[in-house]
Image (spheres, helix red, strand yellow):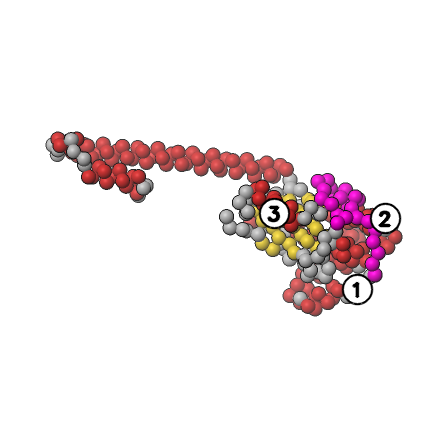
């Protein structure tokens, strides 16, 4: 089957960064994962990398600015209980996780399982740099709330992996359907491989998944029923042709018709054998 992976909406969330060994896979909420993840680290403040990225990739600058502005709106509306510089990394991850948990998911994304893979360097930079923090939060919000016109209503289960690194262009995003790699199990294995077992998850709406699976089973049942009807239609048409030939033979008084092989009847049988008789 053709691989239908594609780059997700360009939030500037990219790859090629070392993944944190402290961030573990979780089936709970994003906030729960953050509360359990990581140990406190210190790093000197990084500055200027956002401006450098925008100068290097001017075609993305306008989009990145809008993403950062949205991220600031989210963090300003729900600030941490104490200054970021006074927070441990564990506390900071818990705070960011709480913000992500509150972001609504558009109906067209409700059948998508998300994995957010954030590098150690990205966490440290987020904590130090409010603009980069806003970029990550705003970028995730942009992906989760984006309305995919091809998936309204959701028709298949999907997977989406967002890998976040520093600078902004040092990351990746990809999404694919659950049958893109042959079977759902294959696509799920690819999802976990990209997530590398060290990510936070946003699970799809279980009711939506049930509806998709039920629809898929119904489509399979209808296909089987159509195939049965076609076979029966071909059988009846074959018999009608045989009866017609016999009738014409009787009318013409061809008594030997029943005693010797008939090339015309054999020809009809051959045509039906390859499906041409229905044309």
SS for dot 1: loop
Residue 29 covered by magenta stretch? yes
Is the residue 262 above or below the residue 69 in the image?
above
Q: Which of marks 2 and 3 is nearer the N terminus?
A: 2
Q: Residue 47 carries which label?
A: 1
On screen, residue 31 versus residue 258, left or right, reads: right
Task: Please indicate, yes or no, whether residue 99 appears anywhere in the rendered image.
Answer: no
Residue name at image x 53 percent, y 37 percent: 215
Residue name at image x 64 percent, y 54 percent: 173
Q: Which residues lie in the magenta part?
A: 21-44
Is the residue 143 above or below the residue 58 in the image?
above
Mark 2 or 1: in front is 1
Q: Do callouts 2 and 3 mark residues in contact (Cβ within 8 Å)?
A: no
Residue name at image x 13 percent, y 32 percent: 256
Residue 24, quarter of picture: top right
Residue closer to the observer: 142 or 177: 177
Q: Earlier in the sequence, mark 2 or mark 1?
A: 1
Instruction: Measure the alpha-carbon separation of dots 2 and 1.
Output: 25 Å
On screen, residue 4 versus residue 10, left or right, reads: left
Residue name at image x 70 percent, y 40 percent: 27
Q: Which of marks 3 and 1 is nearer the N terminus?
A: 1
Question: Where is mark 2, residue-wise?
Answer: 81
């Amino acid at each position: 089957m053709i691989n239908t992976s594609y780059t997700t909406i360009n939030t500037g969330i990219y790859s090629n960064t070392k993944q944190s060994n402290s961030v573990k896979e979780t089936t709970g909420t994003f906030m729960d994962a953050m509360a359990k993840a990581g140990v406190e680290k210190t790093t000197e403040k990084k500055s200027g990398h956002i401006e450098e990225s925008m100068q290097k990739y001017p075609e993305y600058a306008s989009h990145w600015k809008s993403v950062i502005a949205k991220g600031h709106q989210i963090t300003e509306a729900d600030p941490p209980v104490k200054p970021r510089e006074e927070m441990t990394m564990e506390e900071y991850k818990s705070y960011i996780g709480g913000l992500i948990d509150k972001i609504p998911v558009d109906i067209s994304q409700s059948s998508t399982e998300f994995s957010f893979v954030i590098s150690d360097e990205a966490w440290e930079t987020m904590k130090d740099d409010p603009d980069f923090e806003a970029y990550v939060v705003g970028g995730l919000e942009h992906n989760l709330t984006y309305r995919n016109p091809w998936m309204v209503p959701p028709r298949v289960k999907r997977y989406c992996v967002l890998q976040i690194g520093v600078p902004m262009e040092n990351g990746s995003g990809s999404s694919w359907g659950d049958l893109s790699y042959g079977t759902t199990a294959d696509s799920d294995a690819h999802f976990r491989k990209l997530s590398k077992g060290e990510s936070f998850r946003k699970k799809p709406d279980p009711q939506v998944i049930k509806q998709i699976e039920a629809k898929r089973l119904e489509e399979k049942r209808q296909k089987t029923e159509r195939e049965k009807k076609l076979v029966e239609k071909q059988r009846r048409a074959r018999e009608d042709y045989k009866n017609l030939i016999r009738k014409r033979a009787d009318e013409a008084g061809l008594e030997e018709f029943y005693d010797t092989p008939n090339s015309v009847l054999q020809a009809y049988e051959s045509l039906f054998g390859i499906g041409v008789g229905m044309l």
